Image: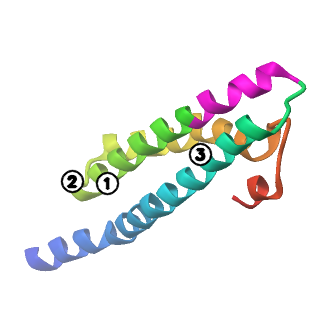
């Protein structure tokens, strides 16, 4: 095999992952805007029986936004440079803070509206 074919094959191998991360970044921005407006609406207009639930809403949301921003940056950097440590960090950030934050924002809140479950 020639060297040009091997380089071509290597570059095409990471292209689908790069495209998925790129589109995920755009959808994450839309999700962050919608979820932020929904959290603000709940905080202003709804009555929470448990004050802890009310105070937990924004820290969980901001934790998700910070983790998602870091995850997108590390994922883009890892796919463009083809480095395994960045891709491993992308995978770990996808699992650890993301799962708990999204479960809380989608299902475990005291007040859930149908848009929470749809998002």
Residue 57 relative to residue 6: left or right: right
Question: Can residue 1 be seen at all in this image of the molecule?
Answer: no
Q: Secondary structure at mark 3?
A: helix
Identity of the residue drawn at 38% across and 69% down = 19
User: In the image, residue 118 lies at what x, y percent?
Assistant: 75, 61
Question: Which stretch appears magenta?
Answer: 50-61
Residue annotated with mark 3: 36
Looking at this view, name the residue that lies furthest to the front. Answer: 45
Asked if residue 14 lies in the magenta stretch, the reply is no
- How far apart in space, not on screen, are marks 1 and 2 (Cα)? 8 Å
The image quadrant of residue 10 is: bottom left
Above/below status of 113 relative to 6:
above
Q: Secondary structure at mark 2?
A: helix
From the image, give the main secondary structure of the stretch colored magenta: helix
Residue 96 relative to residue 88: left or right: right
User: In the image, residue 23 lies at what x, y percent?
Assistant: 43, 67
Nearer-N-terminus badge (2/3): 3
The image quadrant of residue 43 is: top right
Nearer-N-terminus badge (3/1): 3
User: In the image, residue 18 lies at what x, y percent?
Assistant: 35, 64
Question: Can residue 85 be seen at all in this image of the molecule?
Answer: yes
User: In the image, residue 28 lies at what x, y percent?
Assistant: 50, 56
Q: Return the mark for residue 81.
A: 2
The quadrant of the image that shows the N terminus is bottom left
Callout 2: 10 Å neighbours few (<14), some, many (20+)?
Answer: few
> Of circles 3 and 1, which is in front?
3
The quadrant of the image that shows the C terminus is bottom right
> Of circles 2 and 3, which is in front?
3
Residue annotated with mark 1: 76
Identity of the residue drawn at 32% across and 40% down = 85
- How far apart in space, not on screen, are marks 2 and 3 (Cα)? 32 Å
């Amino acid at each position: 095999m020639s060297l040009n074919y091997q380089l071509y094959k290597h570059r095409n191998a990471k292209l689908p992952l790069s495209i998925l991360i790129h589109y995920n970044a755009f959808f994450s921005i839309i999700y962050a805007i919608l979820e932020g407006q929904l959290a603000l609406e709940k905080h202003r207009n709804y009555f929470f029986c448990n004050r802890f639930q009310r105070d937990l809403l924004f820290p969980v949301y901001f934790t998700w936004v910070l983790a998602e921003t870091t995850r997108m940056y590390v994922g883009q950097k890892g796919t463009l440079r083809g480095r395994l440590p960045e891709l491993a960090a992308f995978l770990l950030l996808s699992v650890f803070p993301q799962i708990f934050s999204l479960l809380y924002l989608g299902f475990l809140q005291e007040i859930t509206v149908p848009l929470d479950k749809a998002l």
